[in-house]
Amino acid sequence: MVINGWQDVQDEVLRRLQARIWKPGELLPNEADLAAEFGCARTTVNRALQVIADEGLLERRRRGGTRVLVHPTRRATFNISLIRREIEQQGYAYGYRLLSQRHERPPAALRERMQLQPGIRIPHLKALHSADGEAFVLEDRWINVSVVPEAAHIDFRQQSANQWLVENIPFCGGNLALSATHATNVEADLLAVDTGTALFTAERHTRNSAQVTITNVRLLYAPGYQMQLEL
Amino acid sequence: MVINGWQDVQDEVLRRLQARIWKPGELLPNEADLAAEFGCARTTVNRALQVIADEGLLERRRRGGTRVLVHPTRRATFNISLIRREIEQQGYAYGYRLLSQRHERPPAALRERMQLQPGIRIPHLKALHSADGEAFVLEDRWINVSVVPEAAHIDFRQQSANQWLVENIPFCGGNLALSATHATNVEADLLAVDTGTALFTAERHTRNSAQVTITNVRLLYAPGYQMQLEL
DNA sequence: TATGTAATTATGTCCATACATATTTACACT
DNA sequence: AGTGTAAATATGTATGGACATAATTACATA
């Protein structure tokens, strides 16, 4: 067992966790002891353990030591890319059509998350993204014009809001809710499917650092779509 | 601008990215220069930049320097927990019922991913998880008995396969495919919904380190279920 | 017994330095 | 022009030492 870098330490620790040498709920030896055993510096052990803890397998607390988690809550990650890229990466021709662009009153719940005055009208867009001419995803988006004033005057016929926002709004947090919904008459028509068809649906809130919702988008994917996550 | 730890460096770099002081596609100053500017050690800058690069905002290459990514592909993370915990965390009473447990021939595609001989029979389970007595999710699982021989003789009436596997099989990689499907007659009956109802569906492959599929599970969630991801 | 304080301990992180490694650039040679 | 080799350069990472910080434990005091 020759340890060269922190990756080797990581591998060895993972091996011991797999082999149940350190069992769920148990405490690991402290970093100094492990460093002595592995013949490396404590910082090297520290790095390895921190990474493993980030992965969600260990719990580390000052003075409390490092403990093997009983329920290793695995984390799946999904890479969010532009719809355009997603389509083009699969080798299809990307198509985009703006269906409507109006200033409207947002639903109360959304208005609240955007911290807007009652009665205010904000940009509300509907658009269709297609792959090789086939409807791919229907986009229904609201944009908080008080956070992104420029958006009020942009013509989204040429450039999709999706792309414009990614390129012009600095990254920030948010959340994504996935579900299955039935296509309404209108939606079914636009996606060229039967009314009531099961549609994979993603609703995304994007917030700025002050936790104000910048944009809210609901994406209805055409049947057959699968979202792939790695874990 | 006083820099104290690597988090401060991270914050300052993020600020500059937000403020477009370093624009997409551009090269950042090298670590040594930044360290000099911030009045800290290069290792501190290194740590901050590595974290940001991990987040997917920067691209770092040896000798090539650190570049601002043009399409910052944001990453959404989903914490996978036991179904039992997911239900109990929402304050419901967890219920579990094994519907069937048989040894059957897996579909060809699955047999291949499990690297099994043709004709072999492996455990195939169906079970229903419920929340406060209401059907919550329908589980349909295959277990690769050549990787997990113990599984052949376990009685999954008491302990769900979900829980048994988590507790007995060391963590590993895999993937998760999310989609929307229509409930078949049988599924609709078990979930107490109408045939054809849109169901949020998760299909998960769990692999060991040798990339052999250990278990494959298809989860059909009752209507109304939403999967929440943070980004 | 209850409570406040100090000692202890394990992790968190900084620093300066050194060397490793990947990549590009420069340059000499053909 | 093409090719191979050496120099330069930015990141990757190990090290030992130091101090910070959180949390537990032990102990003294009321």
Image: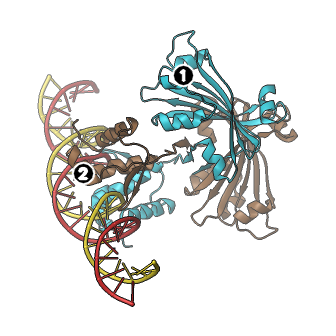
Chain colours: A brown, B cyan, C yellow, D red
- What is the chain letter for disc 1? B
Where residue B126 appears, as percent x and y from the top left, is 67, 28
User: Up-down: is C16 above or below B209?
Assistant: below
Find residue B204 and name its label. none
Near mark 2 (Cα within 10 A), the count class, few <14, some 14-19 or many ≥20, is few
**Residue located beneath label 1 in the image:** B152
Q: Which mark is residue A33?
A: 2
Query: Gap between marks 1 and 2, in whole Å?
Result: 40 Å
Q: A107 above or below B71?
A: below
As helix, strand or loop, the secondary structure at mark 2 comes to helix
Residue B124 visible within the image: yes
Q: Position of residue B49 (x, y in %)?
A: 38, 54
Q: Is residue A3 left or right of residue D11?
A: left
Task: Determine the secondary structure under disc 1.
Answer: helix
Q: Are marks 1 and 2 on the same chain?
A: no
Residue shown at the point (70%, 64%) measured from the top left: A114
- What's under tag 2, amino acid-wise? Asp
Identify the image quadrant of residue C5: bottom left
Residue at left 37%, top 35%? A19
Counting from the top left corner in percent of width and height, residue A36 is at: 20, 49
Residue type at mark 1: give it.
Ala
Out of A207 and B163, give the one closest to the viewer. B163
The residue sitting at 79% across, 67% down in the picture is A120
Chain letter of disc 2?
A
